[in-house]
Image (tube, rainbow, N blue to C red):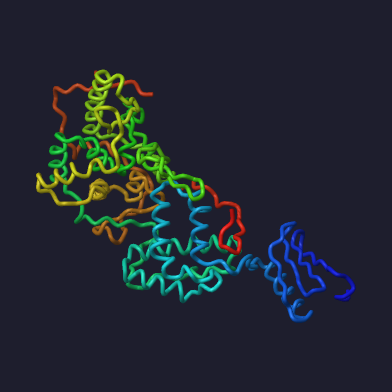
Amino acid sequence: MNFSDRKRISYKIGNSLLAVRDINHKYIVKEGTKRIKLRSGFATKKAAEEARKITIGQLVNGTYVVNDSVKVKDFLEYWLEYDIRKRVQSNNTYITYSNIVKKHITPAIGNKKLTEVNRGDVYSLYRERAEFSKYIARLVKTVMNVSFRYAVRCRLISVNPAEGIDLPKTVEAKPYHTRNIDIAKTLSMPEILILLEASKDTPIHMQILFNVLMGLRRQEINAVKYSDVDYINRTLSVERQLGKALDRNPNGTDEKSTAKNELPLKTSSSRRLLPIPDYVFEAILEERKKYEENRRRRRSQFLDADFICCSNYGKPRSKDFHWPHYKEMLRKTGLPDIRWHDLRSTYCTLLLKQDFNPKAVSKLMGHAKELITMDVYGDNAKIIPEEIPELLSYMEEVMPEKADNDNAEGDILDTVIDIEEFLSERKVSGEGRSG
């Protein structure tokens, strides 16, 4: 058909893609019934025809770029608000991603167009950040890969320039799904006994027990309720964590959110059923007595929310409540000045030293897929069986013995990141955002 025979000629590709040209040497590319882009200003008919062929080819093979003028900083802002904010499970994760974008990626390549970012730019970014901090470099790599994959899905770029780019050799690669425990930063069994005894006179005794004897995370500890305890089988069901809820609305401020909201667990694997050592079980019963007494004494003021780790008014502990008490206790007892999180590693180390299977320990710790090793098991030779071993016999051996005259039977009480899929593909305007 002659180009001048009609003012507009349509080309159909498959069931939905159209390319339309007119006599003014312009052509419009459409997807379904939605206009994507207008091309114009070609000097000749031949130039317009060649450009049309290239665009149709890109549409067919999925490499067509919707908008080639979007800057990196605008895209990353859009990605944080319309993808990450909708998908992540916690405010902490969103804040981490946001800080990496604003403090480390945007200053380096934020003013470049997405389509202009190449592999050299990515490697230079990784190298520069690795000199600043190896930890930050790893986070930058994660954010770059996830965000630029999303850019490909949105057809803002045809190829992910971060794909396959490794960090500099100065940043040691972590073994896949493996977490190493440094036993130099954990407590020995005699030191644990000192810690347990010293904690009895502090308001964080239960938090210490849940950490070092059951391996719970800080936010999991603060969320444990009496209703999570099976008093017959002496097990604890880890069901939730306390933290700051993330406002899912784009550009949300989260100002009304507190750090004591009941939130889903970190991963699906974090939901687990743990055997309760006798020492911890008895402490739970004693703590319940205090809870009931406070509830009777403060009927009008008491918050009956069922939290084990709570104030005298029933309010759950804040995430940093343990900090001053813990540090003061370490100072007074002369114990190593290790982090609170290292107590959780201590629990892991105790099990590994008793020849518990690392994969089983990983499940007890609530890790999704990781195998856990420590430096004495660097060759992973102990990672063999699949079964989760019985913990009660081990805990009976290492925990302080009960007094013979203690009778807990009369104190037994009656008992009662999935991660959302990606949002639908959104088209970003020439300003770098869409509503």
Can residue 349 be seen in the rendering of this structure?
no
Q: What is the quadrant of residue 204 in the picture?
A: top left
Q: Nearer the viewer, residue 67 or 122?
A: 67
Task: Name the residue located 35 percent from the left edge and 46 percent from the top edge.
Answer: 360
The answer to whether 265 is drawn above or below residue 201 in the figure is below
Asked whether, in this view, residue 366 is left or right of residue 276, the answer is right
Lateral position of residue 408 relative to residue 245, left or right: left
Tell which of 402 and 344 is nearer to you: 344
In this view, 139 is above or below 309: below
- Location of residue 425 by image quarter: bottom right
Looking at the picture, how far across and down is residue 206, in whole percent?
23, 35
Is there any visible trace of residue 379 in the rendered image? Answer: yes
Residue 194, by quadrant, is top left
User: Would residue 65 be found to the left or right of residue 251 on screen?
Assistant: right
Report x, y in % for residue 185. Answer: 20, 54
Q: Is residue 77 left or right of residue 396?
A: right
Residue shown at 32%/53% (left/top)? 372
Q: Quadrant of the N terminus?
A: bottom right
Above or below, 141 against 231 in this view is below
Residue 16's place in the image compared with 2, above or below, is above
Task: Give the total of numbered labels.
Answer: 0
Q: Position of residue 273 (x, y in %)?
A: 37, 37
Picture coordinates of residue 253, whole percent (x, y) = 44, 47
Task: Give the residue at x 36% y 69%.
Answer: 129
Query: Which residue is outermost to the right?
Result: 5
| 312 vs 393, nearest the viewer | 312
